[in-house]
Image (cartoon, rainbow, N blue to C red):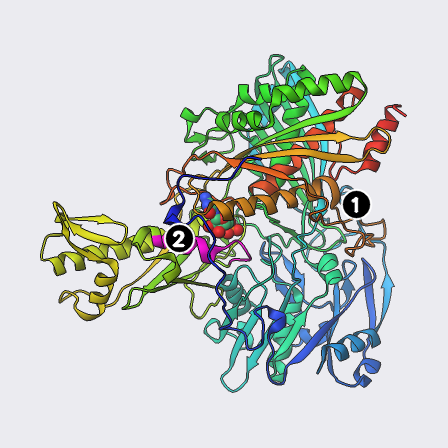
Amino acid sequence: MIQCKTSKSIGGMGHSLKRKEDARFIQGKGNYVDDVKLPGMLYMDIVRSPYAYAKIKKINIEEALKVPGVVAVVTGRDLEKYNLHWMPTLMSDTQMVLPTDTVMYQSQEVAAVIATTKYAARDGREAVTVDYEPMKPVIDPFKALDPSAPVLRNDKPGKTDNHIWNWKVGDKEKTDKLFETADVVVKEQMHIPRIHVASIETCGCVADYDKVNNHLTMYMTTQAPHAIRTVIALVAGHVGLTEEKVRVIAPDIGGGFGGKVPVYPGYVIAIAVSFLVGKPVKWVEDRSENLQADSFARDYHITAEMAGTKDGKILGTRFKILADHGYTDASANPSKFPTGMFSIATGSYDYDTTYMECDAVYTNKPPGGVAYRCSFRVTEAVHAIERITDRFALEIGKDPADVRMQNFIKKEDFPWKSPTGWIYDSGDYHAGLEKAMKAVNYEELRREQAEKRARGELMGIGLSTFTEIVGAGPSKDFDILGIKMFDSAEIRVHPTGKAIARFGTKSQGQGHETTYAQIIAEELGIPAENIAIEEGDTDTAPYGLGTYASRSTPTAGAAAAMAARKLRDKARKIAAYLLEVSEDDLEWEPGKFSVKGAPEKSKTIQEIVFAAYTNHPQGMEAGFEATHYYDPPNLTFPSGAYICVVDIDRETCEIKVRRFVAIDDCGNIINPMIVQGQVHGGLTQGIAPAMYEELIYDESGNILNGTFMDYLVPTAVESPSWETGHTVTPSPHHPIGAKGVGESPTVGAPPAIANAIVDALSPFGITHLDIPITPYKIFKALKEKQVF
Ligand code: CDP
């Protein structure tokens, strides 16, 4: 086992602070939305469609209204009166809050039942009956493009097909020419399956509209409270909910992974009902609703091609994608990037020719395309490049490690401009792979594999050497609904030298309470345990775009350092005044300023802060507070070298992941223990789509695995023992040299596992299998090759 250790733990803390009890926001016992209990609170449950595509003829609510405790049933027609039956998606598409005429996917919200208890609301839900006229749905995204397919979004004037948008990047002509002339060209058709974030807690809210003060407090499971408040004001400003009258509070949200970025209809209905009846309304979805109706992730059909030379030089790539968005494009992407950061798909390799193109389509499936622990489609990009690189190595008969070493961008070539225009900030890919190969004893493994192959045993070794792109983002390119993707920190240091710092991000278990405090401690010399960290309340925190896509460290982490540095500048001025010397005569060591050459003359940060309130220089503003809105000059480009070893039982096709070594490079590490935790969790969420998870629909649009009984989320039982380590290549533009890390393992693990399995099966002529790779898929592939 490689130990995750670093000689440099920023802020001097190699351990995690105890999670601070924070019951400030919740008037109940716990700290989750479901714990919020307010006087007179009503409960909401949602009637959902059994059909994937159907006309609504009539919604029968009379029986439901007879259920004791039921106070109202809300339909799309009710919301239509207030023009609240549609809402914008984060990709500027439109989504129904409740339908007035047609349902577009199975499990879509059809009506909401409001009652005095949650049991009455559920009984009321069961008592609502709906008369539908089912229609033939469009489920296959390829068939959705057929001119004979029904036009699903006929609510859009002039829409004549199911095509949403076309995106392209790169040089088509040059790439096509290369593929015509190159010595070696390989091609694979891949599907990155539709999956679900399946966070521990489902989505929910308590909408608390106070009629007297015309004010809405929204307790809600959101990763981006400020952006949500703005969206609420945009959607409901016309009925009086303007932004200053809305407070969004995100308490402990029970995991997010990108799935708690969008606005779901349940939130909007709860707000509308609370607004109309003047009482708090709670809505918390159950597990099946969460799995079946909330935003999905992935669902990219990719044709990946690579061109190169017979001796292993990669010359170019070509990617053609079909993106299935369900009935609306509800992705959570930055506006200018409909395919997110897919254009990082050129990978860690030095070549200059690529062309990528994507068409997005509507189908009768739930909407979404969220960045599930992924910087907006990086998972899809990394899978495509890492799989096709292995395919290329197989074609030319070279070891995939050698092909990677031969083609890596060299560390001295950073900053490096990719063929799609990204400026990779820093990296040392050779060092990462060398470390991983050493840890796993690569040569010995290949020798063992050769022996096993000779005996007919199935053993595979898979590599993934990925480059990530996180930290959205520089405001010149990155916005969501027009709001630039900066992030913020505000630090207030009290007279006694203890501080509170507030952020526009929102931790969902990543430990911001610990790491942000460490950054400030490192910069100001105030002990981390004396710094309270607060996020998730729009009334108190400075505006920010929230936490997803591993952006918190690159943006808000940087803002924390910059705000602390503003305070250190002020501290220098006060120290100079107190010590009666010039500012230039002072030197800083964490926690105090002392006079150069006379170290006994010094002032601690606590003395300086006290003076800021009691004895500050005349003409200087009193107090000790600073705010910083950080607009990153570039994204950060973490990387990783992962090696997976699998054994496959030739009789049962059972796959055993024998070893998994993950060497990550996220620049300077703030807290090694938290980073290790992030990597362990992320790897488990990487093995999930590689071997287990996929949302499956039949031809009628019925979801076939809409519960945890048949949608297997891996647990400790399925997870191998992860072996982790790191290399450190600081980001040159980040104030503390850190890059994001949260999603790297989720992004990097699937191709390592897929490559290992295909490697094990390659002697039989198998060159590709789509994830999730199950024993049955292996059995079928081997049978096709007449192994059985
Ligand atoms: O945006 P999110 O918090 O999900 O992702 P992140 O920026 O990658 O950070 C995840 C956690 O790892 C945070 O607590 C970070 O402060 C911590 N981290 C770290 O300790 N060192 C790094 N170089 C990067 C992240």
**Is ligand 1 less than 8 Å from the beta carbon at label 2?**
yes
Confirm whether the magenta stretch covers residue 511: yes
Q: Residue at x 48, y 68 (%)?
A: 537
Q: Amino acid at mark 1?
A: Asp
Q: Which residue is nearer to you in this view: 704 or 214?
A: 704
Above or below 222: residue 308? above
Mark 2 residue crowding within 10 angstroms, few (<14) / some (14–19) / many (20+): many
The secondary structure that dominates the magenta segment is: helix
Determine which residue is flagged by label 2: 518
Mark 1: which secondary structure?
loop
Mark 1 sits on what residue? 140
Q: Quadrant of the C terminus?
A: top right
Give amino acid for label 2: Gln
Quadrant (top left/top right/bottom left/bottom right) for the N terminus: top right
Front residue (pair 643, 13): 13
**Local secondary structure at mark 2:** helix
* Residue segment shown in magenta: 507-521
Please indicate, yes or no, whether residue 480 appears anywhere in the rendered image: yes
Could you tell me residue 342's position as x and y percent? 58, 39
- Where 489 sits versus 69, above or below? above
- Give the answer, above or below, for where 61 lies relative to 47: below
Question: Answer yes or no: do the residues labelled 1 and 2 have beta carbons within 8 Å?
Answer: no
